[in-house]
Image (tube, rainbow, N blue to C red):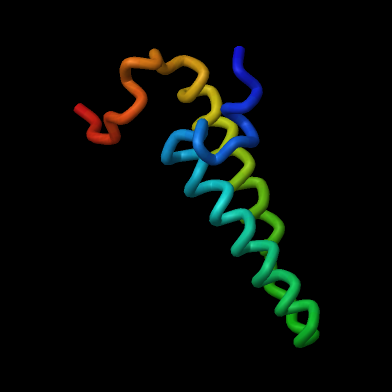
Amino acid sequence: MKLSKIYDPREMNSYQFVAATGLVMTIVANLIMLFLGKAVDNYNALYLCWAVFFTLGTVANFNSKPSDHDHHHHH
C-alpha cells in the first residue's frame, strides 16, 4: 500500500485530483463568503461530498494495477 497515492499529485488518479482541486476551491470560496459575511445553507455538505469522492478515488487507485496507470478512458 503506497501512501504517496494519497498525498502526492503525481500518484493520484483523476478522481483524487478532481476531489482535491474541488476541496481547495470549496475552502477558498468558504473563506471569501466568511470575509463578505455571507453564509450558504448546507455548504458544509460540499466538504463531505469531496471527502467521499476523494476516498472512492483513493480506493480505486489502490485497487488499480500499475499497468492501468495512464488509461483514463473507461469501458
**Please, is residue 32 above or below residue 19 in the view?**
below
Q: Please state if 35 lies on the left or on the right of 68 as rendered.
A: right
Q: Residue furthest front?
A: 10
Q: Please state if 71 lies on the left or on the right of 19 as rendered.
A: left
Q: Please state if 64 lies on the left or on the right of 51 as rendered.
A: left
Identified at 51% across, 31% down, the residue is 11
Viewer-closest of 50 and 70: 70
Identified at 42% across, 40% down, the residue is 14
**Please, is residue 69 above or below residue 32 in the view?**
above
Position of the N terminus by quadrant: top right
Q: Residue furthest bottom?
A: 36
Identified at 79% across, 77% down, the residue is 34
**Please, is residue 4 above or below residue 40 in the view?**
above
Position of the C terminus by quadrant: top left
Q: Position of residue 69 (x, y in %)?
A: 36, 25
Q: Quadrant of residue 52?
A: top right
Q: Position of residue 54 (x, y in %)?
A: 57, 38
How many numbered circles does the render carry? 0
Viewer-closest of 38 and 58: 58
Q: Position of residue 37 (x, y in %)?
A: 80, 85
Identified at 67% across, 68% down, the residue is 28
Q: Position of residue 67 (x, y in %)?
A: 32, 16
**Please, is residue 31 above or below residue 44 in the view?**
below
Viewer-closest of 41 and 12: 12
Viewer-closest of 24 and 3: 3
